[in-house]
Image (cartoon, rainbow, N blue to C red):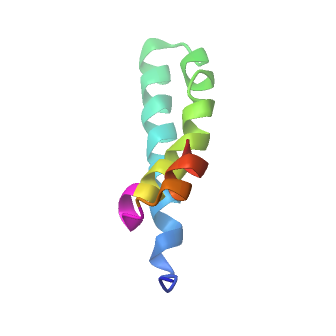
């Protein structure tokens, strides 16, 4: 089993925060906040996918739980 690194916590947090800030800037530019609402589902899946990519744990159980 891999030891947990404290920086591992921040990778998915920053990915979701970055996505939300990016969407906020788009919403401000087009003056329509509903665009942010469409991506809440992605915001739930994104940290799981990021952790899968960063850790490189491509075991079938990990992929199944991410999906």
Query: Does residue 42 appear to the left or right of 53 in the view shown?
Result: right
State the residue at coordinates (46%, 60%): 59
| Relative horizontal placement of residue 56, taking residue 31 as reference (left or right) | left
Q: Residue at x 56, y 28 (%)?
A: 39
| Magenta residues, start to end | 53-57
Q: Inspect the magenta stretch and tell me whether residue 20 lies in it.
A: no
Instruction: Find out whether residue 55 is within the magenta segment.
Output: yes
> x%, y% of residue 29?
42, 19
> Which is more toward the observer, 13 or 58?
58
Rendered-image quadrant of the C terminus:
top right
Q: Is 34 situated left or right of 12 in this image?
A: right
Q: Is residue 37 left or right of residue 12?
A: right
Q: Main secondary structure of the magenta part?
A: helix
Where is residue 33 shown, x and y percent of the image?
59, 19
Position above or below: 44 against 6: above
Residue farthest front in this picture:
60
| Percent x, y of residue 9 | 53, 69
Splitting the image into 4 quarters, where does residue 30 fall? Answer: top left
Of 36 and 45, nearer the camera is 45
**Foreground pick, 67 / 46:** 67
What residue sits 40% from the left and 59% below the top?
58
């Amino acid at each position: 089993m891999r030891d947990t690194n404290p920086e591992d916590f921040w990778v998915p947090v920053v990915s979701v925060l970055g996505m939300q800030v990016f969407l906020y800037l788009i919403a401000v530019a087009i003056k329509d906040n509903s665009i942010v609402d469409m991506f809440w589902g992605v915001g739930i899946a994104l940290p799981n996918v990021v952790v899968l990519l960063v850790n490189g744990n491509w075991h079938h159980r990990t992929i199944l739980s991410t999906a």
